[in-house]
Image (cartoon, rainbow, N blue to C red):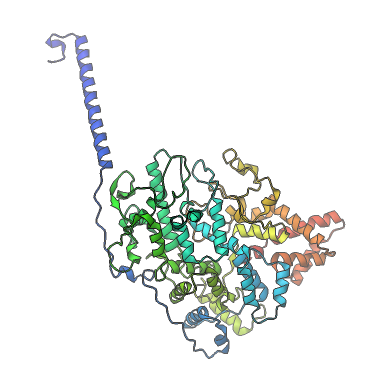
Amino acid sequence: MSCSPSNGGDWESVASCNDSRSRSKSRSLLTSVLVLVLALGEWLNAEEPLPPETPITASDRQHWAFESLQRPNVPTLNSKSERLREWSKQPIDAFVLDRLLRAGLEPAPEADRTTLLRRLSFDLLGLPPTVEELADFQNDSRSDAYEILVERLLASPAYGERWAQHWLDLARFAETDGFEHDKVRPEAWRYRDWVIDALNADLPYDEFIRQQLAGDEANPNLRVATGFLVSGPDMPDLNEQTERRTVFLNDLTSNVSSSLLALQMGCAQCHDHKYDPLSQHDFYRLRAFFDRAFEFKRDVLMTPVGGNKHDVATAFLVRGDFRRTGPAMSPAFVRVVNRGDDQPQIVGDRSNTRSELARWMTHADHPLTSRVIVNRLWQFHFGEGLCSTPSDFGVMGDTPVHLDLLNWLAMELPRRNWSLKELHRLLVTSATYRMASKLPDDADAATAEHWRHAVEKDSLFRLHSRHRKQRLEGEVIRDAMLATTGLLNARRGGPGVRPPLPPELVATLLKNQWNVSEDRQDWNRRSIYLFMRRNLRYPLFEAFDRPDANASCPRRNRSTIAPQALFLLNSDSSFELSRQLAESLRLAGHSTSAELIDAAYFKTLARHPTDRERVLALEFLAADRDDERVAKLADFCLSLFNLSEFIYVD
């Protein structure tokens, strides 16, 4: 029937007819949309077939980091120079010297005792040496005085507090979740304390890893160690818990691989790695080791459920999309670093899968684990690792100049029962570590010429022709200022403390997110015990490149920016600490300006002032009134805190 007046209808009937037709079209369109939505839902929820996996080839394993560990021979020195023959103290030096000689270079002279003590104290303890320690070491005439000093520092509880921060940077440790609400994790500090205690006790590194990956599988009391697995950011209030699970476990898998194996497995969660022989299958097989350890509930903090009691299968996610699941994946070791069959080695018993992964990682002949950790220790002592990309040993990472030395150290660590203190001892007692970072004032012409040649040919310090000067981290600068003034509170452990912050900074937080600790003595505790909020960094730490703990940090930036000088020169905390230092100098009984100047230099820089520095300081401190002289002394102390020499270590 036609809807038109010419067929006998009137205009009302025509309108009614058109309206009916419009509704019919709308219903038809709605039906089509619903069909498409249902079809899309079925497609998204359908199990998709696995894409093909590229096999591992012999050439893939020829990359230096994937090759089996072989103990290289220590080079034999054939030099006519008596100084060079006597210079080498241990195998490390033989490797370094051999490379230097082949480049036509010679090692720098040894640093003086004061420089070595300050270097060692900051490297091993993160604290400056005391006036008494300086005097004792300078007056110690024993032939093994240096080695005795190393032993004393390694035995100090401050050692664990210093080196724990390096590990916490890798683990992404914070005491809050991050994201919008940044909610507090009340028990997170226990993991931080566990790391400190483990390092002080010299827990063998293989056991250090095993407890952090799977301590709860063997002993419920070791569950605190698995804080490593849950240190990263999380969003418990997310509506879609499946998405939360995917993001959390993918980040966890990526962090385990980068921090322990220096593999960038995270690049393979959506597609095969573009450069390294790491497939998307490898990624989800590695993730399968952790899936059953966690149960995700909205607004519940993430902790391992204890063992592997949560029964869940790991699905291959097509293009990394949690809505596009492929077949289930079984736990298996990463193929390119797993010797034997090129097929994935599936772990059948799923009751203790993380323990199996930890045992595989800590096998003495694993090609990556020991290489990675000895490279990290070298980096923190020498300013840069033997491999300059410490969390990426892949094809696009750095190729070590001293590969034989790296391999020798990697083989040496298991031989020394995986003892990190043994490795520290080996590194810092070497002649390589003891070299000067600047040309001595009394250097003869030949030494000066060798130095000039080294600066020219080894400008990046890759050959280790001299020691690299290093800037202190923000936490260490704060601790050094507190220690110098005598205010540092040595109390250890416990929940993070919150010293006062500038009101304008607190105003950027939600209500009650920075309630200042009641005990004022806590405000002066070591920086590692300050409350670590993921969405806020202590101002001094932020200025000096502290990472935000949202991603693993293998090596901090070393920027030079205006806020660093502005904070050290103008902040309330800098003024207060300068006044405290001035007061401590006066109370120590130094009656003359010359004595005050000498004591201030010695406490802050571990040396006496030069004649010119003393003259300038005396001119500055000259005053007629006592109150004016007190104020000037505080300003003088502030100027010492702001010297580059205070925040850099030779």
Mark yes or no: residue 545 visible: no
Q: Position of residue 622 (x, y in %)?
A: 83, 61
x, y percentage for residue 528?
A: 60, 56
Residue 19 locus on image (x, y percent): 23, 17
When the figure is inspected, residue 403 is found, relative to residue 237, above or below; the finding is: below
Using residue 444 as the reference point, say whether residue 266 is left or right of it. Answer: left
Residue 514 visible within the image:
yes
> Viewer-proximal residue, 33 or 564?
33
Residue at the location (50% across, 41% down)?
180
Q: Nearer the viewer, residue 224 or 34?
A: 224
Left or right: 140 in relation to 320: right
Relative image position of residue 252 (x, y in whole percent): 42, 53
Nearest the viewer among 476 and 521 is 521
Depth check: 304 or 67 in front? Answer: 304
Q: Residue at x 36, y 57 (%)?
A: 286
* Residue at 59% from the left image edge and 54% from the top image edge: 541
Outermost residue, right direction?
624
Is residue 370 placed above or below 27 in the rendered structure?
below
State the quadrant of the C terminus: bottom right
